[in-house]
Amino acid sequence: MAQSGKVAILKISAQANGSFAAVLRLAEEGKQPFLRTTHTLPAAPKLFQHYQQWQQSYYALGQTSRWRWHRIIVPNYQVLNASKQGDLKHLWERVQLQGDQVETELHQWFEQSSFRDLREDIIGEVRADEPLRLILETDDRTLQRLPWHR
């Protein structure tokens, strides 16, 4: 028989001062929450700055690739211009580097005391061998698009 787990629902709302209000609800799977805590998460300007740069580089890479592959038909036997290949490689490396910076900033944000408090709230109620689903609720588009899985 499958062991039922718990669900942690984290609702995050942006505040006028740049910080975030966070409400954590913890429940048995399929039941009403038995725990509700509130926290204030710190502003993360560097995270959002790095995210914006990463997004811009990613879109620039897509524009360069589309222009090259969709507007110019290159026969299989034709050697591509080395500078174009270098440009794409440089753009791809920049996207990867900026993605790593976003991940680093995200981890640093998670290390703030308010996130540690959230983790402690969960750890205090969930056994190590118990399944846990984490659901993030937010109206903030940037928060929705962050690479939370990383």
Image (cartoon, rainbow, N blue to C red):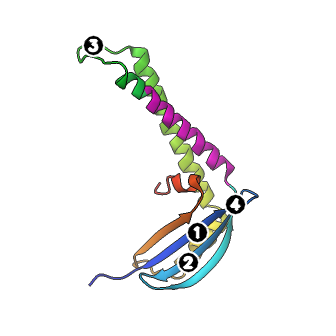
Q: Which residue is mark 3?
A: 78
Give neighbour class at mark 2: few <14, some 14-19, many 20+ (Cα, 10 Å). many
Q: Is residue 15 above or below residue 73?
A: below
Furthest-right residue in view?
17
Q: Which residue is mark 1?
A: 11
Residue extent of the magenta highlight: 44-64
Q: Which residue is mark 2?
A: 25
Query: Which residue is more in the foreground, 79 or 121?
Result: 79
Q: Which residue is painted at 55% across and 36% down in the image?
A: 56
Query: Which residue is more in the foreground, 11 or 54?
Result: 11
Nearer the N terminus, badge 2 or badge 4? 2
Q: CA distance from mark 1 to mark 4?
A: 15 Å
Residue 122: x and y, percent?
54, 76
In the picture, the disc for residue 42 is 4
Q: CA distance from mark 3 to mark 2?
A: 59 Å
Q: Which residue is painted at 34% across and 15% down in the image?
A: 80
Query: Which residue is more in the foreground, 114 or 55?
Result: 55
* Front tag of 1 and 4: 1
